[in-house]
Image (cartoon, rainbow, N blue to C red):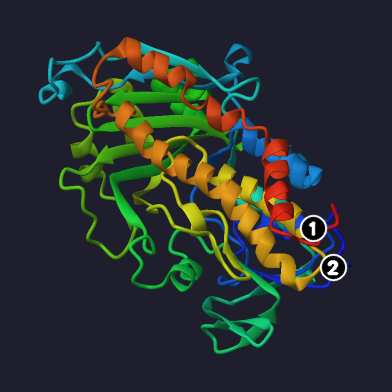
């Protein structure tokens, strides 16, 4: 059931962007009795991409914003099929043939197929949804009169006591506060940090990915029941491939990563139609399981993976950034979307304590102080994860014992976060800054 749009707070918030982060923020504001409007550039709410994973921290944040978000997620979620694999995040194994390690110092660390590690994520394990299906559940919780479409923000400025938004279609809107949730290429980030700031624009991570889907019955025929129906990570030198079930086990989601030799991406487009011969060339030295999977991928695209350099702030005045607009990450820890949901939990609750327009900035300050260090650490450690998976980590190199130990524990700081304490810390910062709040 959607929260009623019956505001009681003396201010109005504009949310720019209707993806997962923007809609979670909007739902959170409505639950705090805050008047709000979400402006989406597209003609309807939509998500691109296929499967997206969430760790225990993100699923907990859903419940804290609105239990109905969690119910919608549970309605759509897919987990590993085998009961004994339910707690597993991924099972990691060598996916490259011996010939693929010719440029690796010391030769192959192990034979193809050898298991490297089993990583568990509490009782949740691999927890994933189809992006578009999860967005459908979020849309159900947003009253129709809260959303406006075809509104791509072009300018945000303070005019008198109000924040004015100007959209590409020439129309304008006013609010007391603006939250930019418009993704990795965020126009709001450019406005807030400045066009020429070194952290304004996304940076190519040096890795691109082939993404596609396989009907589960075909996947089972190719690699067997265990590997098809439970999340797997295949490791190799300068590349890795992951698979996990989505759509209640009807489909295998596949992402095959390859490290670009020159580290550059010179095409203006980040998502391109894929030439299968390019993919097979990138993975020609990989084993049979990987090659079988690649041969079955339906409608695959190639995605360049970009992230953000650390921004010095997530807000200025009554203008803030959230989710990918603030801290776009590579997907190697399955944690980027979850950080947007954490952002929405903290920021909506802080704004719910505010009783005057003048104190909105203090809520943004507290949000920035608590969320920026954690979310930027996720961005950095996501790149580190890819380096481990692809055997280019300077410290671990090809030491499988050390890699196993690192993989089994390195995500705990993300998953085990005490979100209630995080909010208390932010509330204390807000109070220390003299906010007149309803604590």
The answer, for residue 78, to whether it is visible in the render is no
Q: At which x and y percent is residue 329? A: 44, 47
Residue bearing the label numbered 1 = 352
Q: At which x and y percent is residue 344? A: 66, 52
The residues bearing labels 2 and 1 have C-alpha atoms spaced at a distance of 8 Å
Q: Residue at x 24, y 11 (%)?
A: 111
Q: Judge whether 169 appears above or below 374 on screen.
A: below
Helix, strand or loop for disc 2: loop
Q: Nearer the viewer, residue 140 or 199?
A: 199
- Callout 1 environment at 10 Å: few (<14), some (14 to 19), or many (20+)? many
Q: How many marks?
A: 2
Q: Residue at x 48, y 52 (%)?
A: 327
The answer, for residue 269, to whether it is visible in the render is yes
Q: At which x and y percent is residue 286? A: 24, 25
Q: Residue at x 51, y 45 (%)?
A: 373
State the mark number for residue 98.
none
Q: Are marks 2 and 1 in contact (CB under 8 Å)?
A: yes
Q: At which x and y percent is residue 262? A: 15, 47
Toward which corner of the image does residue 342 lie, by quadrant? top right
Toward which corner of the image does residue 201 lie, by quadrant? bottom left
Q: Is residue 158 left or right of residue 395?
A: right
Q: Judge whether 378 appears above or below 133 on screen.
A: above
Q: Residue at x 17, y 16 (%)?
A: 98
Residue bearing the label numbered 2 = 9
Helix, strand or loop for disc 1: helix
């Amino acid at each position: 059931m959607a929260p009623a749009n019956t505001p009681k707070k003396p201010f109005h918030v504009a949310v720019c962007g209707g993806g997962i982060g923007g809609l979670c923020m909007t739902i959170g504001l409505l639950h705090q009795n805050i008047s709000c409007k979400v402006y989406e550039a597209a003609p309807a709410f939509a998500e691109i991409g296929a499967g997206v994973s969430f760790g225990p921290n993100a699923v907990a944040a859903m419940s804290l914003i609105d239990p109905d978000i969690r119910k919608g997620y549970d309605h759509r979620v897919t987990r590993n099929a085998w009961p004994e694999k339910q707690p597993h995040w991924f099972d990691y194994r060598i996916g490259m043939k011996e010939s693929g390690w010719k440029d690796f110092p010391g030769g192959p660390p192990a034979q193809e197929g050898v298991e490297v590690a089993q990583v568990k994520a509490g009782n949740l394990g691999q927890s994933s949804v189809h992006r578009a299906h999860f967005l459908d559940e979020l849309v159900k919780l947003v009253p129709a009169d809260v959303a406006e479409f075809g509104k791509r923000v072009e300018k945000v400025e303070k005019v008198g006591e109000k924040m004015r938004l100007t959209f590409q279609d020439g129309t304008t809107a006013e609010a007391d506060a603006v939250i930019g949730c418009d993704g990795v290429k965020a126009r709001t980030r450019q406005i807030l940090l400045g066009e020429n700031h070194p952290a304004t624009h996304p940076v190519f991570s040096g890795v691109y990915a082939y993404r596609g889907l396989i009907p589960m019955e075909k996947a089972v025929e190719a690699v067997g029941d265990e590997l098809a129906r439970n999340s797997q990570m295949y490791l190799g030198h300068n590349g890795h491939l992951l698979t996990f079930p989505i759509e209640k086990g009807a489909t295998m989601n596949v992402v095959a990563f390859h490290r670009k030799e020159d580290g550059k991406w010179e095409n203006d487009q980040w998502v391109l139609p894929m030439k299968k011969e390019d993919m097979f060339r990138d993975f020609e030295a990989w084993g049979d399981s990987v090659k079988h999977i690649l041969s079955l991928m339906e409608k695959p695209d190639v995605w360049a993976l970009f992230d953000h350099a650390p921004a010095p702030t997530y807000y200025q005045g009554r203008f803030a950034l959230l989710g990918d607009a603030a801290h776009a990450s590579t997907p190697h820890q399955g944690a980027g979307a979850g950080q947007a949901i954490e952002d929405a939990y903290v920021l909506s609750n802080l704004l719910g304590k505010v009783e005057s327009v003048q104190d909105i900035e203090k809520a943004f300050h507290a949000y920035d102080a608590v969320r920026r260090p954690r979310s930027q650490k996720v961005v950095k450690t996501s790149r580190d994860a890819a380096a481990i998976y692809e055997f280019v980590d300077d410290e671990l190199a090809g030491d499988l014992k050390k890699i196993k130990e690192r993989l089994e524990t390195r995500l705990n700081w993300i998953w085990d976060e005490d979100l209630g304490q995080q909010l208390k810390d932010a509330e204390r910062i807000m109070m220390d800054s003299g906010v007149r709040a309803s604590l």
